[in-house]
Amino acid sequence: AGLGGVDFERRHTTANQAKSSVYTTCECANKGESTGVQRAGKLRPFRKTKGKMGGGASTSAANSAQASEMYPSDASAVPAWLEADDLSDAAALKAEVVKLRALVHSHMKNQTDAAKPVVQRAAVMDKHEKIDVSNYKKLEFPKEDAMYDMLKVIMEDNILFRNCKSEEKIDILDAFEPVEFKRGDFVINQGEDGQHFYAVWSGSLKAYINKEGSNLHVASYGQGKSFGELALMYNTPRAASVKVEDDCVLLRIDRTTFRTIVLYFQLERQNKYIGFVSEVSIQDKKLKDLISSDQLSQLASALEVEYFDSGDTIIRQGEMGDYFYIIETGTVEIVKDGAVVKEVGTGGIFGELALLKEDKRAATVVASSGVKLLALGREDFVAMLGNVTELGGTAQEEEDPIFLAAENATGLSETIAGDSLTVIRTLGCGAFGRVKLAEHKASGTCYALKCQSKTAIIENCLQDHILNERKILMQLDHQFILKIHDAYQDDAQIYFVLELLLGGELFTHLRQKKSFAEKEAKFYAAQVLLAFQHIHKKKIAYRDLKPENLVLTTDGYVKVVDFGLAKIVDGKTWTLCGTPDYLAPEIILNEGHDKAVDYWALGVLIYEMVAGEPPFYADDPMEVYEKILSATMQIPTRFSKNLSDIVRKLLKIYQSKRLGNGKGGCSAIVKHKWFYGFDWELLLTKSLPLDAIPIMPKVKNQKDASMFDEYNDEDDEVPVAPDQPWDPVFD
């Protein structure tokens, strides 16, 4: 949307594409045939698009012609069967309306089903994620004033710029570089990794999609138009080529520059806000002496910006108060009983007694200049940290016995040497290699052998991520999390020996059933929740929850798999990664994120399981992100009251208000009314009655891979060692 189709992809699918692939060999779809274009791996049924994408006008004309034939504008030409003379009484009219409603409902359901994702969705990631802002220097290219004016309009219409603060926008505007192109030049080539966002100052261009040797014209651009915005988020193959029709001047900015500017100012604000919050005094003690650095960071992220003009009354003496304020810029006067008591400037604090209890304000506060304030409500403060009286205690917060039982449910993984395995068949293919079913020669036990090409890993700059995945899996021991048994390598590949799960992806089963009943969704969500508690306790953010990454065991339970995007997070991290449908707002906006993104994703998962489609679905990822940031979500009428409530509380735009991200963590979600009556103990012991397990995979034995696609192992390419040897140490 707004890009005229350069980041647009039409999606087709066939029935056999809906089968499960297991243990995705790489969720970072950045390169190669497996990435496709833009929203890699996410194939959707063909959907007619509006005229702005090209072809819409002819479709509309065809529809109009068809409508004219069926429903002539000339009343005398209306067919007899449309005159409805046979409806003689109210009962007949009602019956006809019921039939029409049933027909419309059936048609709408078919249209909705056709829009659902049917092939595994690949995650996205900015593989060049390490940005150093310690020596930040402003980048400025000379431009005409009119160019600045045009860019301001474009930025206000784009979600990636619209949410930037004023100081960021100034540096972003200055960093746009004017570049000239001649007629016939290609600004963008379909299939190449995108790096720049472009705005058209003069000239004209056209976008084409090459399909089966033919170039399909999908969009045209003139002054004031822009394209390529997805490249500012992450590197992904361009979905179309853009060719210059008339000599043009474009204004461009690259991803590294854009993200460096945003990250620099975000870190500056975060550090400043943490400094402000640290100095807040509660009962003669400063917050920095009462809570952890993580909690200080969480409070800083929860601050809301408010602006007041000179002379405005901010709080009034005698009113009930539930917010306290920090002055970021400007000054205020403290007025008591009509007299000015003192003046407070930048960094000053007032109203902090509101954090203790709801009470009447002791004084009036008036802005003596234009003032920018940071506000925090008592309700948010208590939700994150508990009551003020609980702060600074030495006792550890008592762990919910539900979570302790889950952690103690399984033992450690045994070591499996590579030469002790015999490969039986391929289970799945991915960007970096294959996952194979392998049998241990001595014991006969079968495993999943994840084989990853060193060359592909190096080409995609993901060495650290592959090693990080193994490191994280080695730390986790939980009955609802995939186990890793060993890792080894040769000159060409890295091998992970993983627990074998033969029940198929939850994604595949969900598409086959179209949607789950609430009790079925609750069964799977509960297991994810228990896994998250274990993951988060070790300060790990998972960051890629989706049905594709939940695989069924042969007894019908699920395990969380694929930890390629997981990361140990101490405070905030700034890597843009995840699956478009499941990205939290703070990831899209580069605001810094932590484990709270997993609670957002849990809300999306619950919604998708019951509704049959994700809450912010669109063909174009930028439209998905627009919906996410505007909280555009329709709650189906069939959702129960408690289901609607838990989804809304998990899908809070502000991470500080998100269910699970405050005091109590996962326990707060367990205690939500939607889970009332759920038998956690039977879940933990896997002793739920069979009729409580929604799907029981039909797997005959440990070599039965019928839930997965057939692959011709003869087509398996012989791995080639990289030009520069890479032999990581598995410590």
Image (tube, rainbow, N blue to C red):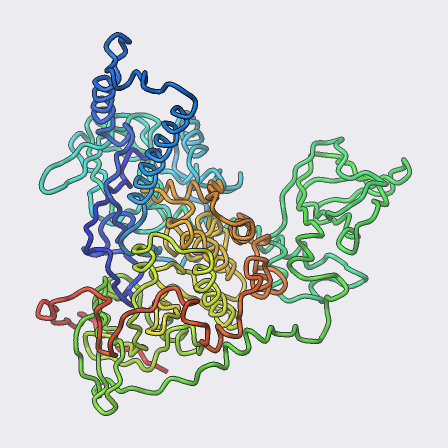
Indicate whether 719 appears above or below 578: below
Position of residue 300 in the picture relative to residue 142 (left or right): right
The answer to which image quadrant residue 158 occupies is top left
Q: Position of residue 611 (x, y in %)?
A: 41, 49
Q: Quadrant of the C terminus?
A: bottom left
Q: Nearer the viewer, residue 577 or 700?
A: 700
User: For the point 47% across and 40% down, which residue is it?
Assistant: 632
User: For the point 46% across and 41% down, which residue is it?
Assistant: 634
Q: Position of residue 623 (x, y in %)?
A: 38, 40
Q: Nearer the viewer, residue 631 or 337?
A: 631
Q: Nearer the viewer, residue 101 or 290?
A: 101
User: For the point 63% across and 53% down, which residue is it?
Assistant: 273
The answer to which image quadrant residue 48 occupies is top left
Indicate whether 366 appears above or below 238: above
| Total number of numbered discs in the rendering | 0
Q: Nearer the viewer, residue 54 or 728?
A: 54
User: For the point 44% across and 49% down, which residue is it?
Assistant: 588
Indicate whether 203 appears above or below 298: above
Position of residue 464 in the picture relative to residue 389 (left or right): left
Position of residue 527 in the picture relative to residue 504 (left or right): right
Q: Quadrant of the N terminus?
A: top left
Position of residue 432 in the picture relative to residue 233 (left or right): left
Q: Position of residue 642 (x, y in %)?
A: 56, 52
The answer to which image quadrant residue 661 occupies is bottom right
